[in-house]
Amino acid sequence: MNGVYILQSTKNKRYYIGSTNNIEKRLKQHNAGYVFATKSMRPLVLALFQECDVLSDARKLERKIKNFKRKDFIEKMIRDRKIITGP
């Protein structure tokens, strides 16, 4: 299942945005410490996942979201349970 995901650290409440073709496996990798960017943020919970048709679309959407770099924008997506591409 291809898609974009937002993880939240239960330790420091920070967010991580990524894309994957297997969300269950990827979440386990994050929480096991295999991902350098999130190793210090563990444990992480899945805050939002949005499926995409192909992985390349998920990667493009991931880049768009990361370009916003606004916590309030990310929190709005989580509240609305939908990934949007503009403020």
Image (spheres, rainbow, N blue to C red):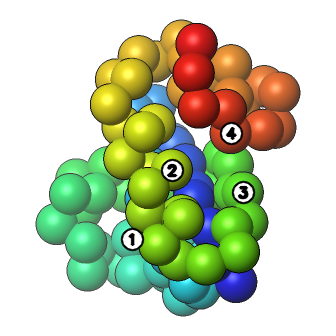
On the question of residue 9 being in view, the answer is: no
Mark 4–mark 2 distance (CA, rounded to whole Å): 9 Å
Report the residue at 47% width, 72% height from top. Answer: 56
Up-down relation of residue 28 to residue 15 (above or below): below
Q: Amino acid at mark 2?
A: Leu
Nearest the eye: 71 or 87: 87
Mark 3–mark 4 distance (CA, rounded to whole Å): 7 Å
> How many dots with numbers?
4
Q: Amino acid at mark 3?
A: Gln
Mark 3–mark 1 distance (CA, rounded to whole Å): 18 Å
85 left or right of 39 in image: right
Q: Position of residue 24 (x, y in %)?
A: 63, 82
Do the numbered discs 3 and 4 sit on residues whose CB atoms are within 8 Å?
yes
Helix, strand or loop at mark 1 = helix
Q: Which sits earlier in the primary sequence, circle 1 or circle 2?
A: 1
The residue to which callout 4 is attached is 83
Mark 1–mark 2 distance (CA, rounded to whole Å): 20 Å
Q: Which sits earlier in the primary sequence, circle 4 or circle 2?
A: 2
Do the numbered discs 3 and 2 sit on residues whose CB atoms are within 8 Å?
yes
The N terminus sits in image quarter: bottom right
